[in-house]
Image (cartoon, rainbow, N blue to C red):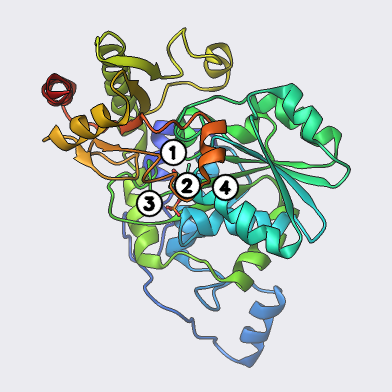
Amino acid sequence: MEDIRKHHEDTQCVHASFIPDDTGAVVTPIYQVSTFSFRDVDHGANLFSGKEKGYIYTRMANPTIEALEKVVAVLEKGYRGLACASGMAAIHTAITALVSAGDHIICSESVYGPTNTLLKTVMSRFGIETSIIDTSDLDAIKAAIKDNTRVIYVETPGNPTLVVSDLAAIAELAHGHSAKLVVDNTFMSPILQKPLTLGADVVVHSMTKFLNGHADVVAGMIVVKNEEDFKHFRKVLNQIGGVIDPFNAFLVARGIKTLAIRIERHCSNAEAIARYLENHPKVDRVHFPWFKSHPQHDVAKRQMTGPGGVISFELSGGIEAGKTLMNSLRLCTLAVSLGGVETLIEHPASMTHASMSKEDREKAGITDGLVRIAVGIEKVEEIIEDLDKGLAKV
Ligand SMILES: *Cc1c(COP(=O)(O)O)cnc(C)c1O
């Protein structure tokens, strides 16, 4: 399919990772090899100098990995993708590619816990300063921008409070100060939000979540907008070395074939469950971008095409009530992660966001009583029945 970029994304999910070969294989096979032979010495030299196209060594490029990079880049409407060993490898590589000692980063306060920790405790040791702020507040961003701000790093909807940041407005602010906007699009997947079309420069994903979708792979992706960035990022990734392996790349590409239909079910299930929780007398507050009560509901409706599959909520009984609920569930599994076909429930303050300081957590609205549910694609009535039995014990 030459014109895969012109197709609907439902079709792109199925076909964009296909690279035809001489065997007639209908999916791109697993090239489980570390190194590729050269026809002769000149061929090897030409591959290294870039005069000829071809494969050299899997850390540099591999056909199965390229197939996966292609489908994600097509879905994100980006130039090229760079597949990584994990979401954190993608985030680390992207940040490292964009900043140097003495530079400043602005980062959303409602962000994946280890991202906050990477910036505040690892990158800080290399002379990179980070301001953690509420990126849903444009005035807060304006106040935080400095002459040496090179990156605005935004996760939206934010983890786990689902606070929404206005990507188009932030891109404008960033570009007015020669900074780049990097967006973690894990919670939305390219089906529900395409940051590059809203002005972002770089998208990162934990493909461990919706893109793979089956809770059996850890993987990440970077998508860039132009050839110049691609060449630079490829070099940095090749040197840092956090690449995916061909087998995992194959699994993620397989998962993506059903991404569009899985996302549909994740969204409809999540909406029904959020509504159920909102009407439950033991639930104080539900964070869900599709509700009018959500503080950035208008921005959400403008830049997202669906609410996603993650809900967070607070029980009137605080953390003790949350513990009783999480320990009582039978269908919903007590585990971190999200975006898989199975419904998972977890406690951010003691689990996904435990690496953040309590102060940073509280600033980001991650109270001790907050519970996060990553809604799967099971029969929604059965998920609600499980929650209903659990809440009855609270
Ligand atoms: C899980 C996650 C990450 C980290 O990805 P890994 O694949 O676990 O390294 C980053 N950002 C978000 C929003 C995530 O949910």
**In the rendered structure, which disc, 3 or 2, sits on the residue that comes first in sequence?**
2
Q: Amino acid at mark 2?
A: Val
Identify the element where label 4 is drawn: helix
Which element carries disc 1, helix, strand or loop? helix
Give the amino acid at mark 3.
Ala
Looking at the rendered structure, which numbered label has been put on residue 116?
A: 4
List x then y, in percent, for residue 180. Answer: 74, 42
Determine whether label 2 and label 1 are within 8 Å by CB: yes
Nearest to the observer: residue 64 or residue 316: 316
Q: Say whether residue 121 is left or right of residue 208.
A: right
Q: Which residue is mark 2?
A: 71
Check disc 1 and report the residue beneath it: 12
**Residue at the image point whose x is 79% and y is 42% from the top:** 179
Q: Earlier in the sequence, mark 3 or mark 4?
A: 4
N-term-proximal mark, 2 vs 4: 2
The residue that disc 3 covers is 253
How much space separates mark 2 and mark 4, taking CA atoms? 29 Å
Quadrant, the C terminus? top left
* Callout 3 touching callout 4 (CB < 8 Å): no
Relative to 11, 111 lies left or right: right
Label 3 vs label 4, nearer the camera: 4
Mark 3 vs 2: CB contact within 8 A: yes
**Of callouts 2 and 1, the N-terminal one:** 1
Q: Residue furthest right?
A: 147
Is residue 22 in sight in this rendering? no
Pick the front one: 120 or 84: 120
Q: Point out the frontmost of discs 1 and 3.
A: 3
- Residue 254 locus on image (x, y percent): 32, 50
Residue 70 appears at what percent x and percent y? 51, 51
